[in-house]
Amino acid sequence: MEADPIRRDPEDVKRLFARVSARYDAINRAMCGGLDVLWRGRLAKTAAALARENGGGGKKKYLDIACGSGDVCARLLGEDPDCSVVGVDFCPEMLALAREKCGGRAEFAEADCRSLPFSESSFDAATISFGFRNFADRPACLREIARVLKTGAPLCVLEVARAEGPLFETAQKFFMCSAVPLIAKAFGGRREDYEYLAKTTMEYPRRAEVEKMFANAGFAEIRTRAMAFGMVAIVSGKKRETA
């Protein structure tokens, strides 16, 4: 079990996201200067491309985990209009936003990633955007995702990454721990909620450890694509036949 001194009980995290849900998109756009829209678009493109590479024919079925307000679900529908998309989140308030954003074009379910309500080998690809760092048991979640993916199907995770080098690491720490809570407060959010989210960023494992978690959970062909001076990354892996 990985050590994380700031990990909260999942119910506490659920209440946190319920509180921030109404301002979630606006604060994200402000924090990232709108770049989060571009990053989520790249995540959807990556997942769709890898799903097509895996073949199998027919309509692709995507699973977006910790779907939040539904940005990636909408992006996946844009990348592959003939696909079906299922979004899961453990926060009902977020799911309400996602349903509104997708206008009935996607299905949604309230679920914890540690116990997904789907059969084995149900999906052609899975995505997570800016949610993986908040999972209470990341290795268990990865194993559960592998269970519901078809053999060779990709998992693509968009997440913050620990900046490399003292200069970028110092800048990232200042921005996340000082600037982000102030931005949230300016939008009417609770500073302490975003202090927690900032701390989860700084405690997030480095690239090698994340890739090792993927491998241990049954994924192969693991790749990391760094963006924003290494402070954001898309990690992808394909379910091994023996996963």
Image: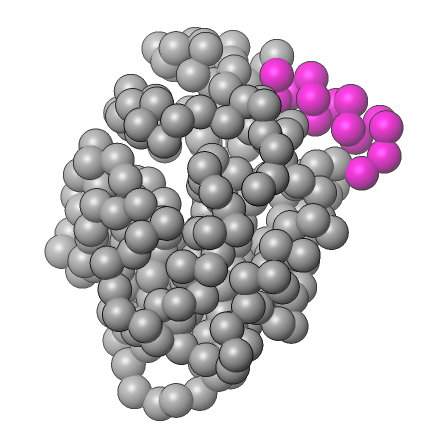
> For residue 147, what is the image quadrant?
bottom left
> For residue 170, what is the image quadrant?
top right
Whether residue 17 is visible: no
Residue 184, how many percent across, how many down? 44, 16
State yes or no: residue 226 in magenta: no
State yes or no: residue 168 in magenta: yes
Q: Is residue 232 above or below residue 102?
A: above
Q: Residue furthest left?
A: 104
Residue shown at the point (77%, 28%) measured from the top left: 169
Side (left or right) of 7 relative to 207: left
Provide the residue span drawn in magenta. Answer: 164-177
> Image quadrant for the N terminus?
top right
Residue 51, how many percent across, how many down? 45, 76
Which is the main secondary structure of the residues drawn in magenta? Answer: helix
Whether residue 105 is visible: yes
Residue shown at the point (50%, 73%) measured from the top left: 243
Q: Residue furthest right?
A: 166
Side (left or right) of 141 relative to 15: right
Residue shown at the point (46%, 80%) measured from the top left: 151
Colour option used: one colour
For the residue pair 190 and 3, the one nearer the viewer reads as 3
For the residue pair 80 and 126, the one nearer the viewer reads as 126
Q: Is residue 86 above or below residue 120?
A: above
Residue 44, how many percent across, how many down? 45, 60
> For residue 6, what is the image quadrant?
top right
Q: Is residue 212 above or below residue 26?
A: below
Residue 13, how many percent across, how many down? 37, 27
Residue shown at the point (20%, 51%) measured from the top left: 109
Side (left or right) of 229 relative to 30: right
